[in-house]
Amino acid sequence: MAADKNKRLDDIVAQAKKYQADREQGYRERALKLYPWICGRCSREFTRINLRELTVHHRDHDHDNNPNDGSNWELLCLYCHDNEHSRYIDQIRYGTTNSATTVNDATHNPFAVLGDLLNKD
């Protein structure tokens, strides 16, 4: 009985992986035909030799939203794609305001008396 459950689970996982690979292959091929082989962020150029390092990013993060005109796709290199998803996860997790990026006005001016010191005779 446990073997039957494991086989069913294995079949489900294999089917899901196949579905994902088929789906990716379809929109990837279309995106590579529509857009120049250049990363949309860092402008790195790709050839057939390193094309596997160029990925298709879904702008709305919905991998099932694949319009024929490619309006939801963006070609990104592996590094920029990872960065984009990391930023998206951070935004979901922490929200749009991040105290680390908040700029506060300075209250102290270390050069306030510099003019006096330079004009001193």
Image: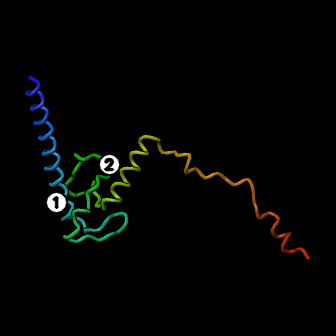
* Residue lying at 18% horizontally and 52% vertically, measured from the top left: 24
Outermost residue to the right: 121
Q: Earlier in the sequence, mark 2 or mark 1?
A: 1
Where is residue 6 drawn, in percent x and y? 12, 30
Frontmost residue, 75 versus 70 = 75
Q: Amino acid at mark 1?
A: Glu
Disc 1 secondary structure class:
helix
Q: Quadrant of the C terminus?
A: bottom right
Q: Nearer the viewer, mark 2 or mark 1?
A: 1
At label 2, counting other C-alpha atoms closer than 10 Å, the crowd grade (few under 14, some 14-19, many 20 or more) is few
Where is residue 75 drawn, in percent x and y? 28, 61
Disc 2 secondary structure class:
loop
* Residue lying at 64% horizontally and 51% vertically, measured from the top left: 104
Q: Amino acid at mark 2?
A: Asp
Frontmost residue, 67 versus 109 = 109
Number of residue marks = 2
Q: Which residue is mark 1?
A: 29
Residue 118 lies left or right of residue 81; in this view the side is: right
Residue 120 lies left or right of residue 106; in this view the side is: right
Task: Please say if 120 is above or below 110.
Answer: below
Q: Determine contact: label 2, label 1, CB under 8 Å.
A: no
Q: Which residue is mark 2?
A: 60
Alpha carbons under labels 2 and 1: distance apart? 19 Å
